[in-house]
Image (tube, rainbow, N blue to C red):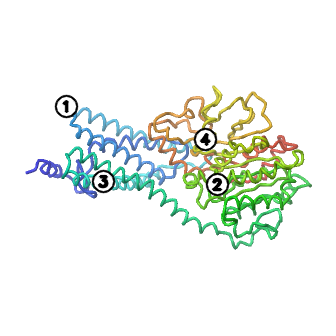
Amino acid sequence: MNPAIVEKAARRVGRSPLLPAIGDADRVFERVLSGVGLMVVPWAFAASLVPSLLPRAPWLQGVASGVTVAVGYGLGAAAHALWRYLQIPGLKGRARSIALGLVIGVGMVLVLLSAWKFVGWQNDIRRIMGMESTSPTIWPVVIVVTLLVFTLFVLLARSLIVLARTVASWLGRRLSRRLSITLGVAAVLFLLWGLWTGVIVNGFFAGANAFFAPQDTTGTNSSNRPTAPERSGSPESLSPWEDLGQYGRFFVRGGPDVAELEALNGPGAKEPIRVFAGLQSADTVQGRADLVLEELKRTGAFDREVLVVATTTGMGYLDHRGTDPLEYLWNGDTAIAGVQYSYLPSWISMLADQDAVASTSRVVFETVHQYWSTLPSNDRPDLYLYGLSLGSRGVESVLSSISIVNAPVNGALMSGPPFVNPLHARLQAERDPGSPASLPIYEDGRTVRFANSEGGLERGGARWGPTRLVYLQYASDPTVFYSPNLAFREPDWLKEGQRGPDVAPTMEWFPFVTMWQVLLDMPAGTAVPAGFGHMYSSQDNLDSWAALTQPPGWGPGMRERLSTALPSD
C-alpha cells in the first residue's frame, strides 16, 4: 500500500469530527490544515490587533485580522512545502519538541496579550479623536468575520493549488517532475496576472462606472435648484441643471448667500459665484472647459477679487468645508469653478482616474488661465487653485505646467494630498533637516508650507513669497501617509519626534502588517470627526485660505466670528 495513503489515514484516526486534521489538503473543501501554517496563525492574529492610524469598526477589524491570518497561514504552509521540496533536513526528537513548544507558546502569549490590550488600544485612538469608547462586546463580530475571511482565502488558495497541480500533472507526462511543477506554478501565476491586469481590474472599473453612472442623476428633479444668476444651473446659466451631475448640483446650490454673509460680515456682500460643468455638459474635456470659461465671463467672475479653479474628486465632489470658508473670508467677492471628470467615487477614482484628473485639470486651467492672463494685471482677480484628495493631484499637474511661468498663479491649497502625488512625495523626501515627516518644512517656507489642525503655516525662516502653496494634511490621514514601502521599512512619521499629534503613541511599525493596516484605514478615512483622518475641517481650511489670500481685516476677532458660522460636520 502507498505509504502516503497510510499516513493520511493514520492522522484521521481518533480526531474529533469537528476539528480539521493536520497535513496537506488534496481537495478544495477537505478539512485538513497545514501544521506549520497553524503555528503562524497566533503570531499573525496578534499582529493584526495592534493599533493603526484610525479606530476600526468590529467588522473592519475582522477583515483586517482575517486577511492577516490567512496571509500568515499561507506563508507558513508555503515555507513548509518549499522546505520539503528542497529536501532540507528538519529538527527531530527533543529539539523539534522544544522548537514547537516555543513557537506555539510565544504565539499564544502574544495573542492573549494583544487581545487583552486591543480594546484599550482602540479607545486610545478614539479619545484622541473625541469619539465614543468601544467595549469588549465587539469581540464576537471580530472573531466571526475573521474566521469567515480566513476560510474564504484558504479556499481560494486551495483552488489555485489544485489548478497548478492539474497543469503540472498534464506536463508531467512529457517533462520531469520538478520541471513540470515549476512550469505548472508559473502558468497559474501568469494566468492570475493576466486576469488581474486585463480582466479583473478593467472589469471592476467598467462595472463600477456602469453602477455609479445612474447615481449621477440624483437630484435632477429637485426644486431646490439655484435661482441666482451667479450660479450654474440657474435659468440664466449656459450649463443646464440636469447636466451638472449629482455633486455639481450639490455644489452650485450650496454655500452662503448675500443675506448670510451680511448678517456675519456687515453690508456690502456679494453673491458668491459658483460655476460647474458635469460630464453631460459637453462631449469633451475641452468642451467642458470652454463652457466653464463662458460661465465665468457671464457671471462677471473676472471682476471679483478672488478666482479659484478647483479640481474635484471622483464624481465631481467639492468639499463645502473647503469652499465655504473662502466665501466667508471675502464676503462673497469670489468665484469658484469646477469640472467633473468621472462617475466613480473617490476611493475608486484614486486608482482609475489619475490620468483623467491630471488631463482635465490642465485643460480647464489652461483655458481659464489663457483668458485671465490677457487681462490687465491690476484689474483682474487673484487666481488660486484648490483640490482635496485626488483633486490635489490635478492641482500638482497644473503647478508643473509650463503655461504658468509667464503669468503665475497667486497660490494653491491642497488638502489631504494622496500618496500618488509626485510633487508632494518629493517635497516630503527633500524636507529641511530636522523638520518632522508628519509636518515638513521645505526650503525654509519660501513657497510651500505645510499645515495641520494645530497650524504650522507660521513656520519657516524665509519670507513667504507672492506665490503661496499650502498642503493641509493630518498625520492620521492614511490617504496621505500610505506607501508600499511600509511593508519593509519603518516610516519617518512614526519615529520619535516626528509623529503627529493625532497619531496614537501606541502605534508601532511591523513589517507587512503596518502596510496592510494603513491601506485598510483608507476607506475609513471619512468615518471620523472633522479634524482627523481624511476629514479636513472648515476651521483648518479657513486658516489656510486666510494665509494664502490675505483678506483685509483678518485677525483673531474675524477668525472667531467666522468660525461660528462655518459647518462643523
Rendered image: mark on residue 422: 4
Q: Which mark lies nearer to you, 1 or 3?
A: 3
Q: Which mark lies nearer to you, 4 or 1?
A: 4
Q: Give the Cα separation between the discs numbered 4 and 1.
A: 55 Å
Rendered image: mark on residue 313: 2
> Which residue bears the numbered disc 1?
94
Quarter of the figure with residue 292: bottom right
For residue 398, side relative to residue 183 (left or right): right
- In the rendered image, residue 82, in percent from the top left (x then y), is placed at 27, 40
Residue neighbourhood size for the residue with mark 1, other residues' Cα within 10 Å, grouped as few (<14), some (14–19), many (≥20) = few
Q: Give the Cα separation between the discs numbered 1 and 2.
A: 61 Å
Question: Does residue 121 lie above or below 163 as drawn?
Answer: above
Rendered image: mark on residue 476: none
Between 88 and 398, the residue placed more toward the observer is 398
For residue 392, side relative to residue 209 (left or right): right
The quadrant in which the C terminus is found is: bottom right
The residue at the point 22 percent across, 44 percent down is: 178
Residue lying farthest to the top in this orientation: 433
- In the rendered image, residue 445, in percent from the top left (x then y), is placed at 72, 32
Q: Which mark lies nearer to you, 1 or 2?
A: 2
- In the rendered image, residue 259, in percent from the top left (x then y), is placed at 86, 60
> Which residue bears the numbered disc 3?
158
Q: Earlier in the sequence, mark 3 or mark 2?
A: 3
